[in-house]
Image: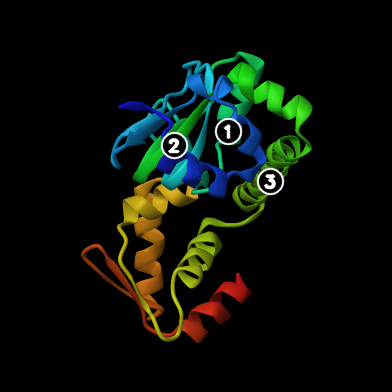
Amino acid sequence: MNILLNGEILSVAIKKFPYFKNLFEDKEKSQDINYHKIKSGTYAFFEGEYYSFISLVLSGTIRVSKISENGRELVLYRVKQGESCILHISSALSKQPYSATAFVEEDIEVINIPVAAYQEEMANVDMARVFTYQLYNKRISNMMVLLEEIVFNKMDKRIAEFLLQKSTEENHIIEITHEEIAIELGSAREVVSRILKEFEKINLIKLSRRKITILNHVKLATYYESL
């Protein structure tokens, strides 16, 4: 449901995105800006569609992915509060279809700015321009790291690294499914399950329903370094 800006929403928007303060406070320009809520478990943007606005996230989390024809998903990055989806910005500014799929993991609140208004702010406000370029740099860096991991690292090493990142010596239980790990790492569930079972055989982890217990965090870290 789209809602026009009011005082409360405006205050939050300025706090999260001070780069667009002038735009938000301009009564004439802000008339075409709206506030939108989207529930978790739904999609915010679809691949192949064009959106004539740019969304700034006030709260919640969006998972941005590429999904293959056979349903395999590769997570590119996540968009959280105070951020925007750079693929969405690129699509809107270039008038080209959106090149990914954006899934709402946690209920989101967004501010939707018309493309023309966003372009004007980028042209005239240094902070808005820097915010956009910094997003580009951050996301490109993230995707380069992801590409390097996929091309150069074996899947067993990537899974070991993932488990280490999601746990500590004190908190050694990870509540996650094999399918969810596969989505995060851009692999098939069958491959993830096979590798996890191999880890279990050498007493690195214990598998149970929707849960992975790290039996020895130091041993897992040593194993990761050896791969």
The residue that appears at 55% across and 25% down in the rendered structure is 27
In the image, what residue type sits under mark 2? Val
The residue that appears at 41% across and 25% down in the rendered structure is 69
Give me the C-alpha separation between circle 3 and circle 2.
27 Å
Give me the C-alpha separation between circle 1 and circle 2.
17 Å
> Which residue in the structure is indicated by mark 3?
144
Upstream in the sequence, badge 3 or badge 2? 2
> Which residue in the structure is indicated by mark 2?
110
Q: Is residue 1 above or below residue 157?
A: above
Q: Nearer the viewer, residue 164 or 62?
A: 62
Upstream in the sequence, badge 1 or badge 3? 1
Q: Position of residue 60 (x, y in %)?
A: 40, 48
Q: Tell me whether circle 1 and circle 3 mark residues in contact (CB < 8 Å).
A: no
In the image, what residue type sits under mark 1? Glu
Q: Nearer the viewer, residue 195 or 186?
A: 186
Upstream in the sequence, badge 1 or badge 2? 1
Q: Tell me whether circle 3 and circle 2 mark residues in contact (CB < 8 Å).
A: no
Q: Say left or right for 132 vs 16.
A: right
Tell me the quadrant of the picture where the C terminus can be found.
Answer: bottom right
The residue that appears at 49% across and 72% down in the rendered structure is 164
> Which residue in the structure is indicated by mark 1?
25
Q: Position of residue 118 (x, y in %)?
A: 63, 25
Q: Say left or right for 77 vs 7.
A: right
Please say whether residue 174 is visible from this viewpoint: yes
